[in-house]
Image (spheres, rainbow, N blue to C red):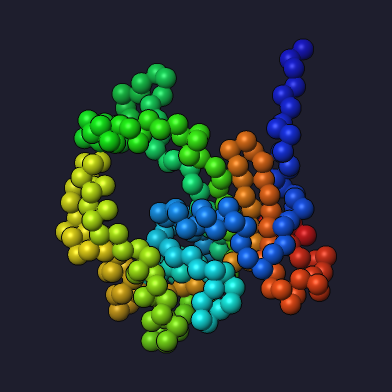
Amino acid sequence: MAEVQQPPLNWEASATATHPQISSTLPPEVETCLKNARFLHLATCDALYPHVSLMNYTYLPSTPFDPSPVIIMTTNPSSKKTLNLINNPRVSLLVHDWVSHRPPTRIPDPSRESSPPPQAIRSSLASLLLNINTSALSSISATINGTVRIIERGSEEEAWCKERHLENNTFGDQVREEQGVFGAPQNPASTEGDGGASCFIEGEEVRVMLVGVKEGRIADWKGGVKDWVIVPPEEQDQRGSDTMVNGIS
């Protein structure tokens, strides 16, 4: 009879709430992840299927217009995600600090193109970075649930958020150096000093959306999960038992 595999000691059923941490701020590991990650995945939904987008973003623990943690992103007003948000402002985000490069498999697959490209492999610096023990770099992924508010066009808040968002997504020389190391073709927009970000942030038609963070879940590479909820300090003592965490009451 085959031996039954036991889950890790810190495993909890992910379909249930897991004694959520209640705070007015994000858990430190989630905040660190948001400060260090390059992109996040944004999931919106209409009446049929979820729609996932890879997004530039800016995390702020508060703004002059909102005392709670927020995430700034921009969107084209005619995009699929914008249309979804108009009908359903609830979103789910995924951000992680795991190394996303897929290492070679034990049995080479000739049908899969090399990733990273050969130019990167030939670089001693790139080889060093790619061969770092990924388990030492990998820590958590965080699912973040919240509600999007599309900021009024031409408002002081919109101008302020665009400025912070552009500052946070201006990389300049670093982007060009990485493109050279990994063999990516040079994008003329990236020579503008902001990695081409300004056209996606400052364009006249671009809308600024603000995600008000409500709750989330941290998952580690061992399968452990931990829930958390953002509750303003004045509401923590009055928090009822009907609060939902990741859709579970």
Q: Quadrant of residue 162?
A: bottom left
Position above or below: 16 against 47? above
Q: Position of residue 101 (x, y in %)?
A: 39, 38
Task: Write the residue at 56% across / 63% down.
Answer: 91
Task: Write the residue at 56% across / 79% down.
Answer: 66
The quadrant of the picture occupied by the C terminus is bottom right
Task: Write the residue at 42% across / 76% down.
Answer: 161
Q: Is residue 223 visible?
A: yes
157 to the left or right of 215: left
Task: Work out whether residue 240 or residue 168 is closer to the camera in this orientation and state it.
Answer: 168
Task: Work out whether residue 75 or residue 228 is closer to the camera in this orientation and state it.
Answer: 228
Q: Quadrant of residue 38?
A: bottom left
Number of callouts in the render? 0
Q: Position of residue 41 (x, y in %)?
A: 47, 55
Q: Position of residue 3 (x, y in %)?
A: 74, 17
Q: Quadrant of residue 193?
A: bottom left
90 to the left or right of 106: right
